[in-house]
Image (cartoon, grey):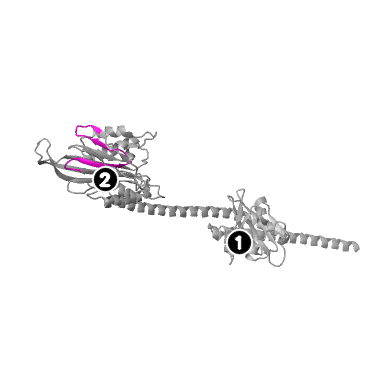
């Protein structure tokens, strides 16, 4: 009987042990299922958006809920500065928290980012790695915490931490393992969101830049129209009568014409080259061509002021030298670095007398009626705007009937090809000789075309302007 009782006891004990083992397996299976569902829940949450700010909110809310924690935060790594920062911080003091930056290695989060190791802290204030930089800003006491690295493609992009487990109990090792499991899909989704965010910002910046560029181009087109409005675009013909020298009687028998025409091509939308011509009395034609030292809008503004002064001050009583002297006094400024080379003259159409003044400009060419070419030399002055008390002198020459004067800027002679050879004076003179019988508009076109052929596609680095004046007999 005793043996039977012992056997029954043993069988009962074995049944209990078997039941306990089964129950433990059941509990383990239940916990594993619960963990799997939690991770599945995390995956659904973090993959529900590609926008970084929305994703950060979901990560923090989901982590807090699953880990049964009071709070959660994601702190990202700034690789360039070697710092951690809060890209998103909720609450009334969120702006203050976003200003906080931790050095890699600073505080518990910095230590995790530096070492790549997870950590469970049961008493945060007693941990030697603890930094109260954030807690002081938000006035939020941290009792215990878990902090794990966010690793994507072998690179630590941030840390995920949960604070203060609810129920006054510390976090467990299993909690730490669960948070590490949460961190894996979170890191991948976060990196994708960060890449998308960077792409969005780049696209936005491109749109802003494009809009600004289009607005600037529109404004430059308007500026170009305004600048071109300062310049005469049509040929000016001034007619007069001249004495027939061969007649010997001094009678005014010949009908004479002076014709002025010009072209300009800025290196940019607007430039600093300028020209002008207009009648100042019945027999005299005023003309000017200049080159401002700079390019673009500053040069265009200086050019506009210069042209306004030239036209406003020129009168029948002034000589070219007196005009430049007066304009220079107006243009000169102590702190200005801009100046303009200039050549201006007054042609008496009836007599051919040419009074001119040169402010450091390229010497014009005269093409005589017999085909000879010569540089028009004379006493030079400094460019406008260099010295306030500069006195400009007058020079004198004569344009016979059939003669032509050509003014140009250094955008012609200093034009370069791909090997940085300059066009030069010899090539310019060859064109003038070759085209000596051409009409002014054809000569203007040929001069620019010859420069372009020489440059052979090299970028135009300087403005180009040319002014031609012919003195000739009018056809009967």
* Res 60 label: 1
Q: Nearer the viewer, residue 399 or 458?
A: 399
Query: In the rendered structure, which disc, 2 or 1, sits on the residue that comes first in sequence?
Result: 1
Q: Is residue 53 visible?
A: yes
Q: Residues within 10 Å of mark 1 (few under 14, many from 20)?
A: some
Q: Nearer the viewer, mark 2 or mark 1?
A: 2
- Residue 70 in percent (x, y) is at 65, 65
**Looking at the picture, how far across and down is residue 265, in whole percent?**
31, 44
Q: Does residue 413 sit above or below 12 in this rendering?
A: above
Q: Is residue 297 left or right of residue 431?
A: right
Residue extent of the magenta highlight: 348-373
Percent position of residue 60, x then y: 61, 61
What kind of element bears circle 2?
Answer: helix
Residue 393 within the magenta-colored segment of the rendering: no
**Any magenta on residue 367?**
yes
Q: Quadrant of residue 148?
A: bottom right
The residue singled out by tag 2 in the image is 320
Disc 1 on helix, strand or loop?
helix
The C terminus: image quadrant: top left
Of 66 and 118, the residue lying toward us: 118
Q: Residues within 10 Å of mark 2 (few under 14, many from 20)?
A: many
Instruction: Report the quarter where the N terminus lies.
Output: bottom right
- 182 relative position to 323: left or right: right
Quadrant in the picture for residue 408? top left
- Contact (Cβ within 8 Å) of mark 2 with mark 1: no
Task: Tell me where residue 372 sits by quadrant.
Answer: top left
Q: How many marks?
A: 2
Whether residue 66 is visible here, answered yes or no, is no
Q: Residue at 65% x, 63% y: name it.
A: 135
């Amino acid at each position: 009987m005793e043996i039977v009782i012992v056997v029954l006891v043993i069988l009962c004990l074995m049944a209990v042990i078997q039941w306990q083992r089964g129950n433990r397996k059941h509990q383990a299976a239940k916990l594993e299922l619960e963990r799997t569902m939690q991770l599945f829940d995390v995956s659904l949450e973090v993959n529900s958006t590609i926008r970084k700010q929305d994703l950060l909110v979901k990560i923090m809310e989901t982590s807090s809920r699953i880990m049964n924690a009071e709070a959660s935060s994601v702190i990202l790594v700034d690789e360039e500065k070697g710092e951690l920062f809060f890209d998103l911080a909720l609450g009334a003091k969120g702006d203050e928290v976003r200003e906080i930056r931790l050095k890699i290695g600073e505080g518990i989060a910095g230590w995790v980012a530096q070492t790549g190791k997870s950590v469970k802290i049961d008493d945060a204030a007693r941990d030697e790695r603890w930094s109260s930089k954030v807690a002081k800003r938000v006035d939020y006491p941290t009792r215990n915490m878990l902090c794990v690295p966010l690793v994507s493609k072998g690179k630590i992009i941030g840390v995920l931490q949960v604070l203060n487990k609810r129920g006054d109990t510390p976090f467990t090792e299993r909690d730490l393992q669960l948070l590490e499991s949460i961190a894996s899909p979170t890191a991948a989704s976060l990196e994708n969101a960060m890449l998308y965010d960077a792409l969005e910002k780049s696209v936005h910046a491109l749109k802003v830049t494009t809009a600004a560029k289009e607005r600037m181009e529109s404004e430059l087109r308007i500026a170009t129209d305004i600048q071109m409005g300062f310049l005469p675009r049509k040929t000016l013909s001034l007619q007069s009568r001249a004495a027939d020298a061969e007649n010997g009687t001094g009678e005014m028998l010949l009908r004479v014409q002076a014709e002025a025409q010009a072209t300009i091509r800025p290196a940019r939308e607007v430039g600093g080259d300028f020209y002008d011509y207009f009648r100042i009395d019945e027999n005299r034609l005023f003309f000017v061509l200049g080159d401002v030292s700079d390019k673009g809008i500053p040069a265009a503004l200086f050019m506009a002021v210069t042209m306004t002064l030239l036209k406003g001050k020129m009168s029948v009583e002034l000589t070219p030298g007196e005009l430049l002297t007066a304009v220079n006094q107006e243009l000169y400024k102590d702190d200005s670095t801009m100046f303009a080379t200039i050549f201006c003259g007054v042609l008496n159409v009836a007599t051919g007398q040419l009074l001119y003044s040169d402010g450091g400009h390229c010497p014009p060419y005269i093409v005589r009626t017999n085909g000879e070419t010569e540089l028009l030399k004379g006493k030079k002055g400094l460019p406008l705007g260099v010295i306030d008390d500069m006195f400009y002198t007058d020079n004198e020459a004569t344009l016979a009937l059939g003669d032509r004067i050509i003014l140009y800027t250094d955008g012609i002679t200093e034009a370069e090809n791909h090997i940085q050879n300059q066009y030069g004076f010899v090539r310019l003179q060859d064109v003038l000789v070759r085209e000596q019988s051409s009409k002014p508009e054809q000569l203007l076109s040929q001069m620019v075309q010859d420069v372009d052929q020489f440059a052979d596609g090299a970028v135009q680095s300087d403005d180009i302007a040319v002014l031609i004046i012919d003195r000739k007999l009018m056809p009967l």
